[in-house]
């Protein structure tokens, strides 16, 4: 291997790839990058076996070759080099790295092959728009659970229909659902359902958001190996498909409501932030009372004090009060970006449904909290 490439491009790619190397690798090989020089690129491979990435960096290749090197050391080394050309050369069982006055050599990993990456058939069966991924990352991913003992709740359920794609996440206490019709392409007529780790969609969004590819992200499903492959430009990610059954979330979606309200998101966020100061000393319990022309937001902590404030709103139906977890409500309000928020209730112990005013492509549910008195 002998190649020359720009420090800025190399460092950025190494940083992205480093997110796929495990902190505590059960197999020593997984703490390394597999570098391959060929066809005008340095290809960087990294994996934790559950997911992985291949990312290409433009380079002048003087000699093709492959090498396995420590991921953390290489990432930190290249990040500290000047913004200039970096020369790589494999000599005498070491990778020599030169940049201006800086010279270093890294020991290479020998005696074991790097885990093989899944290979797709390169058919563009499904294309998801980059802007759709961005919205999913903001509006859906945060509702997934981080409890690894319940793996199905750590995933995002993706339903691929003929004309639309739907994303759903829930941790058992809240649920986010987003659907999109375009940009989205699917050749098959039947609906396909996938359950993918929420963190892979988050990383996918971060990784491809800065790429120049305008057509979106290509998704291939490898049913025989229970994996998926995402590709965009010079970046390819793979991930396992989570096994198990996602909760039948449709059963908790209320069909009828006794009260509806429309409120300015910023005004509601301001009130909830203040009320949350008191709610955190009372199990994060915050009460929302829908009254005529207003929402009353309150929290009461016996050891601290209480807070009550009103937010102007357009309301329809009976007056209803519901208690929710203030942390969940704050996360919702901080992750959505639309101006007017719709709120619907079927009763004081029913799920609270939040939507964007005048639209049906996003829905968020927060389960109520039972309180005494």
Image (cartoon, rainbow, N blue to C red):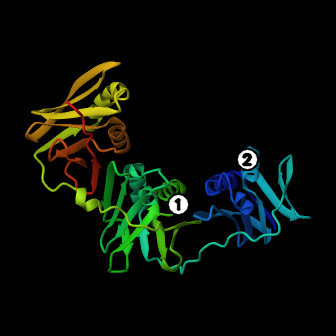
Between residues 335 and 82, which one lies in front from this camera angle?
335
Which mark is on residue 86?
Answer: none
Label 2 Cα neighbours within 10 Å, binned few <14 / some 14-19 / many ≥20? few
Q: Mark 1 or mark 2: which is in front?
A: 2
Seen in the image, is 373 located left or right of residue 36? left
Which residue appears at 84% of the width and 62% of the height? Answer: 89
Residue 215 % position (x, y): 45, 67
Residue 350 % position (x, y): 20, 47
Residue lying furthest left: 317
Q: Secondary structure at mark 1?
A: loop
Q: Quadrant of residue 251?
A: bottom left
Seen in the image, is 118 located left or right of residue 301? right
**Mark 1 or 2, nearer chain start:** 2
Residue 371 % position (x, y): 24, 35
> In the rendered image, which residue does mark 1 sit on?
212
Q: Quadrant of residue 13?
A: bottom right
- Give me the C-alpha separation between circle 1 and circle 2: 26 Å
Seen in the image, is 20 located left or right of residue 373? right
Residue lying furthest front: 372
Between residues 90 and 212, which one lies in front from this camera angle?
90
Q: Secondary structure at mark 2?
A: helix
> In the rendered image, which residue does mark 2 sit on?
76
Residue 232 in view, yes or no: no
Quadrant of the rendering where the N terminus is positioned: bottom right
Quadrant of the rendering where the C terminus is positioned: top left
- Confirm or deny contact between disc 1 and disc 2 (CB under 8 A): no
Seen in the image, is 311 located left or right of residue 185? left
Residue 114 % position (x, y): 72, 69
Residue lying furthest right: 92
Label 1 Cα neighbours within 10 Å, binned few <14 / some 14-19 / many ≥20? few
The number of numbered discs placed on residues in the rendered structure image is: 2
Between residues 152 and 96, which one lies in front from this camera angle?
152
């Amino acid at each position: 291997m002998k190649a020359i490439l720009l420090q800025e491009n190399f460092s950025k790619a190494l940083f992205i790839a480093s997110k796929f190397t495990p902190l505590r690798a059960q197999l020593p090989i997984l703490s390394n990058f597999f570098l391959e020089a060929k066809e005008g690129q340095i290809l960087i491979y990294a994996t934790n076996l559950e997911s992985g990435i291949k990312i290409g960096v433009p380079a002048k290749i003087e000699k093709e070759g492959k090498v396995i090197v420590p991921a953390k050391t290489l990432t930190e080394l290249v990040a500290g080099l000047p913004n200039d050309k970096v020369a790589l050369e494999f000599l005498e069982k070491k990778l020599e790295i030169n940049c201006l006055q800086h010279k270093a050599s890294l020991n290479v990993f020998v005696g074991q092959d790097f885990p093989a990456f899944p290979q797709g058939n390169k058919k563009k069966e499904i294309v998801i728009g980059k802007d759709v991924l961005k919205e999913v990352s903001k509006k859906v991913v945060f509702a997934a659970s981080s409890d690894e003992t319940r793996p199905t709740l750590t995933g995002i359920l993706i339903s691929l229909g003929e004309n639309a794609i739907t994303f759903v996440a829930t941790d058992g206490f809240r649920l986010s659902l987003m659907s999109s019709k375009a940009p989205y392409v699917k050749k098959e007529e039947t609906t396909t359902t996938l359950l993918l780790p929420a963190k892979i969609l988050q990383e996918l969004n971060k990784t491809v958001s800065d790429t120049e590819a305008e057509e979106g992200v290509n998704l291939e499903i490898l049913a025989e190996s229970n994996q998926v492959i995402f590709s965009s430009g010079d970046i390819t990610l793979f991930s396992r498909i989570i096994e198990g059954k996602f909760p039948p979330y449709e059963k908790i979606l209320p069909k009828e409501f006794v009260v509806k309200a429309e409120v300015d998101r910023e005004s509601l966020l301001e009130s909830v932030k203040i009320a949350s100061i008191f709610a955190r000393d009372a199990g994060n319990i915050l009460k929302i009372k829908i009254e005529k022309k207003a929402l009353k937001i309150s929290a009461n902590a016996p050891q601290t004090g209480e807070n009550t404030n009103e937010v102007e709103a357009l309301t329809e139906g009976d007056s209803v009060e519901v208690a929710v977890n203030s942390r969940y409500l704050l996360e919702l309000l901080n992750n959505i970006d639309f101006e007017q928020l719709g709120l619907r209730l079927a009763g004081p112990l029913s799920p609270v449904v939040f939507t964007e005013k005048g639209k049906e492509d996003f829905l968020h549910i927060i389960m109520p909290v039972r309180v005494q008195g």
